[in-house]
Image: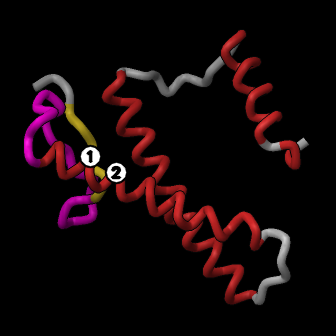
């Protein structure tokens, strides 16, 4: 049991919950996979109406609600990415060199408003 998998939810005390990562077909691993898939699907569901709302005048309450839901979904997506990155053995080191240049160009093409 060298590696642990962070579950996509916290334990009863609010602390991160982990399980051994060596049993991919175990009930808890499958449950965690299902929760991660649900979290990402909710993020996609929230993102669909949020993009058009960026061009609409919103009340303060509407804007707060939209930002709150978006922040929740982003937090879940980042937790999923972190968990999956750990399982893949990816480093937390920033991307540099040619890979960083390629990624930067791709992001600039995907988000022309950010330029």
Within 10 Å of the Cα at label 1, are there few (<14), some (14-19), or many (20+) other Cα atoms? Answer: some
Magenta stretch encompasses residue 16:
yes
Left or right of 110, for residue 48: left
Magenta stretch encompasses residue 12:
yes
Residue at screen point 36% across, 58% down: 38
Residue at screen point 49% across, 47% down: 78
Using the image as rendered, state which of residue 37 and residue 89 is in the foreground. Answer: 37
Left or right of 101, for residue 65: left
Magenta-drawn segment: 10-27
Instruction: From the top left corner, tell me how far across and down residue 115 is, in percent.
Output: 91, 41
Q: Quadrant of residue 41?
A: bottom left
Using the image as rendered, state which of residue 81 and residue 35 is in the foreground. Answer: 35
Using the image as rendered, state which of residue 49 and residue 88 is in the foreground. Answer: 49
Q: CA distance from mark 2 to mark 1?
A: 5 Å
Residue at screen point 42% across, 39% down: 82
Left or right of 71, for residue 37: left
- Secondary structure under the numbered disc 1 in the rendered image: helix
What residue is disc 2 on?
A: 36
- The main secondary structure of the magenta stretch is loop
Tag 2–tag 1 contact (CB < 8 Å): yes
Quarter that holds the N terminus: top left
Left or right of 87, for residue 1: left
- Secondary structure under the numbered disc 2 in the rendered image: helix
What residue is disc 1 on?
A: 33
Instruction: From the top left corner, tell me how far across and down residue 27 is, in percent.
Output: 8, 47
């Amino acid at each position: 049991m060298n590696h642990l998998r962070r579950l996509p939810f916290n334990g009863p005390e609010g602390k991160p919950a982990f399980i051994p990562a060596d049993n991919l077909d175990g009930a808890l691993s499958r449950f965690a996979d299902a929760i991660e898939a649900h979290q990402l699907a909710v993020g996609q569901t929230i993102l669909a109406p949020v993009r058009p709302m960026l061009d609409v005048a919103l009340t303060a309450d509407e804007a707060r609600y939209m930002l709150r839901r978006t922040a929740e979904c982003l937090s879940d997506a980042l937790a999923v990415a972190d968990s999956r990155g750990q399982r893949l053995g990816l480093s937390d080191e920033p991307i540099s060199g040619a890979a960083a240049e390629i990624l930067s160009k791709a992001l600039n093409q995907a988000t022309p408003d950010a330029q």
